[in-house]
Amino acid sequence: AQSVTQPDIHITVSEGASLELRCNYSYGATPYLFWYVQSPGQGLQLLLKYFSGDTLVQGIKGFEAEFKRSQSSFNLRKPSVHWSDAAEYFCAVGAAAGNKLTFGGGTRVLVKP
Amino acid sequence: NAGVTQTPKFRILKIGQSMTLQCTQDMNHNYMYWYRQDPGMGLKLIYYSVGAGITDKGEVPNGYNVSRSTTEDFPLRLELAAPSQTSVYFCASSYSGGATLETQYFGPGTRLLVL
């Protein structure tokens, strides 16, 4: 069965500093990987996704993620965070059959001024 | 496009009551999903549907029922509410996966409190 682990429950970062969120997955085949962001009181919005090809994926809002098969990881990064990046971030792995996703527990990001 | 809409936004239920959470999408997606979100647990799939008239169980289906009579609507029914069903419920939709995985689009959520 597929699974996703986000080791950091909370991260606090200063505005303008870099951010990296960790994601480790377990999946038997080539994974489909996603990062979603959830702002307070809102639904989930897709930041980026990886299906195949280039292992460095660019997303919206200046985010990028790198797929590392050898480490079963798909970490999310942003070079310089803005106060509006304060949100909860979810990593997910998917199976093409049924188009189903398995989500990690999420990482809540707090941005200090 | 409104995307995925959910009603109500918030509801308080008493133990044993029933209710239906509504979900509608206007993107002509054939796949639809219901998730629940509990603190620190991420989202868990309750039920999903690959088209009108076809539904299947997800990871946590107990205590819930669904139906899919149209492409647009995918209501979630709680028959006998229990405190364990206190959660935030999200509906999502996507095109069919086929050979690849399609992006799921999420509604704003329904917050349910069972007392």
Image: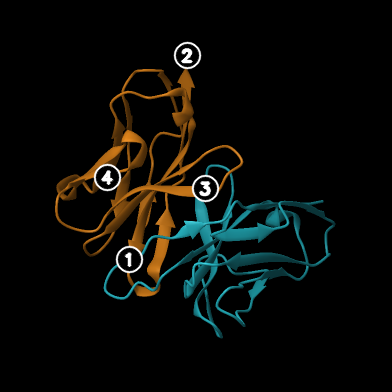
Chain colours: A orange, B cyan
Distance (Cα) linking label 2 and label 1: 38 Å
Distance (Cα) linking label 3 and label 2: 29 Å
**Marks 1/4 same chain:** no
Which of pointers 1 and 3 lies earlier in the amino acid sequence? Answer: 3
**Chain designation of label 4:** A
Distance (Cα) linking label 2 and label 4: 28 Å
Residue B88, x across and y down, in percent = 64, 51
Q: Which residue is mark 4?
A: A74
Q: Crowdedness of circle 4 by 10 Å Cα count: few (<14), some, many (20+)?
A: many
**Which residue shows up at 53% across the image and 60% down it?**
B1
Q: Crowdedness of circle 2 by 10 Å Cα count: few (<14), some, many (20+)?
A: few
Residue A7, x across and y down, in percent = 38, 37
Query: Residue A102: which numbered mark, if any?
Result: none
Q: Which residue is mark 1?
A: B101
Q: Tag 3's secondary structure?
A: loop
Depth check, mark 1 against mark 3: the one in front is 1
**Marks 2/4 same chain:** yes
Task: Give the amino acid type for the residue marked by disc 4 in the picture.
Answer: Phe
**Chain designation of label 3:** B
**Marks 2/1 same chain:** no
Residue B99 lies in quadrant: bottom left
Depth check, mark 3 against mark 4: the one in front is 4
Q: Which residue is mark 2?
A: A113
